[in-house]
Amino acid sequence: MKEKEPKIKGNVFDIKILRRLFSFTQPYLLQFYFLLFLTIVAALLGPVRPYLISQAINNYVVTANFDGLQKMVILLLGILIVNGLVQYLQTYLAGWLGQHIIKDIRSRLYSHLLKFRLQFFDKTPIGRLVTRNVSDIETLSDFNDVFASTIGDFLQIFFILGFMFWMDWKLTLFSLSMIPFLLISTYVFKEKIKVSFNEVRTAVANLNTFVQEHITGMNIVQIFNSEEREFKKFQAINEEHKRANLKSVLYYSVYMPIADVIAAVGTGLLLWFGAREAFGRPAEMEQIGGVLIAFIMYIAMFFRPIRMIADRFNNLQMAIVSSERIFKLLDDKEPLQDSGIAQPDTFKGSVKFDHVWFAYNDEEYVLKDISFDVKPGQTVAFVGATGAGKSSVINLLSRFYEINKGEISVDGIDIKHYDVNSLRAHISVVMQDVFLFSDTIYNNITLFNKNISREKVIEAAEMVGARKFIERLPGGFDYNVMERGATLSVGQRQLISFVRSMVYDPKIIVLDEATSSIDTETEELVQGAMEKLMKGRTALVIAHRLSTIQKADKIIVLDKGRIEETGTHEELLLQRGLYYQLNAMQHKIFA
């Protein structure tokens, strides 16, 4: 799916955006002001050199004053050394400041994303978020350097004009006769490259989205022998990316020679006019030579920043657009998880759903008027056909999603009043599709929680029956499972998730179809681990295989988002209703 990107508005000096960007310089104000100082000094030192060269020619070369010339050369050499040092400090400090600000923005954005509800990630392409966190923020990395350089270019133009008018105002006005042509060509280039950069950003976002999705789903691509078709789709997106970049290459290749030609014509006109003036005033011939040389240097210096400003303006535009996207995401408070203040020291583990209604989209309710009670230490199972709403119950309990109507309470307190972190610290969820990060088994179990000791991890692994297979792996608990745990079987990943839940010692354990994707032999091992995990805890269990939940204290049968039946295994069989039918159907399947 292609990502629609906002068009570049061209407002480089968007005060609102710039103010927010510069708010990130607050921790580095000393460095920022020093950078501005260096920029001013660098802008002034450049135009000083041609003036000193003209003075050297007119006052010492023409008069054959070698001592005076020697002093002037030493002065020029000193200015060059100082200028080089200033440029070094300016470049390094701009890069240093940019990287620190980028780090702060990236940290704030990622921290903000961590607080979003899962519903936001359901609706937002992952590639778009990758673009925001990587590409868009990377676009800002040179902002300080580009911004400082742009200011430096404007200042240098100002200082150059000052020196030129001071030295010869007539020659200055004639020298500037080609400026309108350069400004027109620069404006056309700026507008063309602006559109081109916008197309490049859109192409990058589309490429990120496609590559991320298809690498993640590579097994589906290969299972259905779709490599060639997907490669053709990739080629089309890649071609679009190339075409967008070639446009900018074309505009640069046209603009730069035109700008050089205009500058060369300006220099030629300057020489012609200066020579004519000199021939008309023979007495001042000696003084005009140094001025002409200085003006030739000034023209070269004058045209260069104008060309650079056009390019830098587009970089600034891209930075402003990227900033708008990033700030829009940072300002999006709607998907943020509301957090209460309740942080009780102890949890008993009672759960109550009171007339709960829930819809993922608008009013297409997947749960309709759900009410049930779970006492501390009880095991309650949820059964029903696919889409009946079983997993939704779990997502709501942990506040991954917010309910539309009704109330969910834990230990008699509405879960909206709990601090989210405190609530989730006492609820552990074991999903059907276990996600493991590309890291060691130990880190996947502890999730880098320093409060969990290695001894506790080994003890928990022993308890759920996972220690043996873990210690057989190369490196044992330090074995790297690779991305998503691809080097482990489904059953092994499931056992690791049980260990992870066990070390966090939750009061409420949720098992979402934990045995639906594993073989019978592994199921017996996992079933034993489940029983140990649920012992002494409130447990909510979702299972397709009804044989795994026959010992549950209560079984709730869901159908199309409503509770149809409630009771124990024996009671529900006697009712000969939906549960009875599901049980009979599974006996036929597994017979």
Image: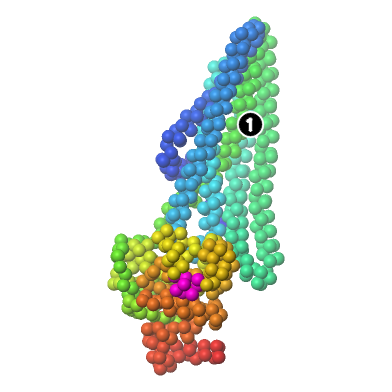
The answer to whether one can see residue 19 in this image is no
Q: Amino acid at mark 1?
A: Phe
The answer to whether one can see residue 357 in this image is yes
Q: How many badges with numbers are in the image?
A: 1
Left or right relative to 6: residue 560: left
Residue at (59% x, 60% y) in the render? 212
Where's the N terminus, which quadrant?
bottom right
Residue at (65% x, 48% y) in the render? 245
Name the one closer to the observer, 444 or 476: 476
Q: Is residue 13 above or below residue 460?
A: above
Name the one closer to the observer, 252 or 117: 117
Magenta highlight: main SS: helix
- Secondary-structure class at tag 1: helix
Picture coordinates of residue 315, whole percent (x, y): 56, 42
| Residue that mark 1 sits on | 181
Picture coordinates of residue 145, whole percent (x, y): 53, 37
> The magenta stretch spans which residues?
460-467
Residue 463 sits inside the magenta stretch = yes
Where's the C terminus, which quadrant?
bottom right
Q: In the figure, residue 84 lies in which quadrant?
A: top right
Q: Is residue 550 above or below residue 342?
A: below
Left or right relative to 109: residue 168: right
Picture coordinates of residue 527, whole percent (x, y): 47, 80
Residue at (59% x, 38% y) in the render? 311
Q: In the figure, residue 146 lies in which quadrant?
A: top right
Residue 325 sits inside the magenta stretch = no
Residue at (68% x, 34% y) in the render? 258
Q: In the figure, residue 541 lies in which quadrant?
A: bottom left
Judge the density around disc 1: few (<14), some (14-19), many (≥20) Cα neighbours within 10 Å: some
Scheme by which the image is coloured = rainbow
Name the one closer to the observer, 99 or 293: 99
Picture coordinates of residue 43, whole percent (x, y): 53, 27
